[in-house]
Image (tube, coloured by chain):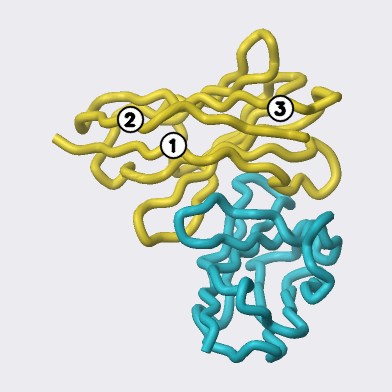
Chain colours: A cyan, B yellow
């Protein structure tokens, strides 16, 4: 199975800050990397697919990059509604494993 | 728009089985996957398996092999996830999610989740 790791596991940042979350795969997954956001008590929501394709309706303050084994999710200007937990997931081969998550708190 | 509606909460005893259903609507094609993902209390997301709604082929995480079965009904708009030999650590919210069967195979749409509690 492909193992996914994320760093940091949690962070606190101020409104307007630039935030970067890193996701690493245990082997190359090309660009088969997706990012999800989840708020407490809600289902996850797809933000970015294929490492860098922003989903319809997702603010342009979100962006994704990377290929192979290292990927990043960047929030260029953190907004109050961006708090929650962010997960990466590989869809290169089954099982489609998730990273452990990064919890984002607003200072 | 695409909607996924799941069955309600379930309470089971250890050793028992549970079925969670997921009905999709809004798709104009049939070549998509239904995935099953669970989240234990306070924990992260765990992928269990998926099925191609068009051809019916299922894939499972090795961890759940022999305990989980993902099926589709003949109308190919509903998927069922059966989990057997339940343990207390199977207590979780079970989500279905749908997405393309080709390309990057992201989980584009999610159901509301179904709480399964395993307790004696």
Looking at this view, is A14 or A103 the one in front?
A: A14
Query: For residue A43, which numbered disc appears in the image?
Result: none
Q: Picture coordinates of residue B20 (x, y %)?
A: 45, 27
Among the 4 quarters of the image, the one containing residue B75: top right
Q: Tell me if residue A55 comes above or below residue B70 in the rendering.
A: below
Numbered disc in front, either 2 or 3 = 2
Q: Which of marks 1 and 2 precedes in the sequence?
A: 2
SS at mark 3? Answer: strand
SS at mark 1? Answer: strand
In the image: residue A22, left or right of residue B92: right
Q: Which residue is mark 3?
A: B52
Looking at this view, is B56 or A60 the one in front?
A: A60
Q: Tell me if residue B96 comes above or below residue B43 in the rendering.
A: above
Q: Looking at this rendering, what residue extends furthest in the top direction?
A: B74
Chain of the residue on which disc 2 is drawn: B
Confirm or deny contact between disc 2 and disc 1 (CB under 8 A).
yes
Chain of the residue on which disc 1 is drawn: B
Q: Tell me if residue A69 comes above or below residue B109 in the rendering.
A: below
Cα distance between the residues tagged 1 and 3 = 21 Å
SS at mark 2? Answer: strand
Among the 4 quarters of the image, the one containing residue A50: bottom right
Q: Which residue is mark 2?
A: B10
Query: Crowdedness of circle 3 by 10 Å Cα count: few (<14), some, many (20+)?
Result: many
Cα distance between the residues tagged 2 and 1 = 8 Å
In the image: residue B30, left or right of residue B11: right
* Residue at left offset 85%, top offset 24%: B29
Q: Picture coordinates of residue A6 (x, y %)?
A: 58, 74
Query: Which quadrant holds the N terminus of chain B?
Result: top right
Among the 4 quarters of the image, the one containing residue A54: bottom right
Q: Which residue is mark 1?
A: B114
Query: Which quadrant holds the C terminus of chain B?
Result: top left
């Amino acid at each position: 199975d492909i193992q996914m790791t994320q760093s940091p596991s949690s962070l606190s940042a101020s409104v307007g800050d630039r935030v970067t979350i890193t996701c690493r795969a245990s082997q190359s997954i090309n660009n088969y990397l997706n990012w999800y956001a989840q708020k407490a008590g809600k289902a996850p929501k797809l933000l970015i697919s294929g490492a860098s394709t922003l989903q319809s309706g997702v603010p342009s303050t979100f962006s994704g990059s990377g290929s192979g084994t290292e990927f990043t999710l960047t929030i260029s200007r953190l907004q109050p509604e961006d708090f929650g937990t962010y997960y990466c997931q590989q869809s290169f081969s089954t099982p489609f494993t998730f990273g452990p998550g990064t919890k984002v708190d607003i200072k | 728009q695409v909607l996924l509606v799941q069955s309600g909460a379930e309470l089971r005893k250890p050793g028992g089985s549970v079925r969670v259903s997921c009905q999709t609507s809004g798709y104009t094609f049939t070549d998509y996957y239904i995935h099953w993902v669970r989240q234990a209390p306070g924990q992260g997301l765990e992928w269990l398996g998926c099925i191609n709604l068009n051809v019916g082929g299922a894939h499972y995480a090795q961890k759940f092999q022999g305990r989980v079965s993902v099926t589709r009904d003949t109308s190919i708009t509903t998927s069922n996830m059966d989990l057997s030999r339940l343990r207390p650590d199977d207590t979780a919210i079970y989500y279905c999610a749908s997405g393309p069967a080709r390309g990057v195979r992201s989980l584009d749409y999610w159901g509301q989740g179904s709480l399964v509690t395993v307790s004696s």
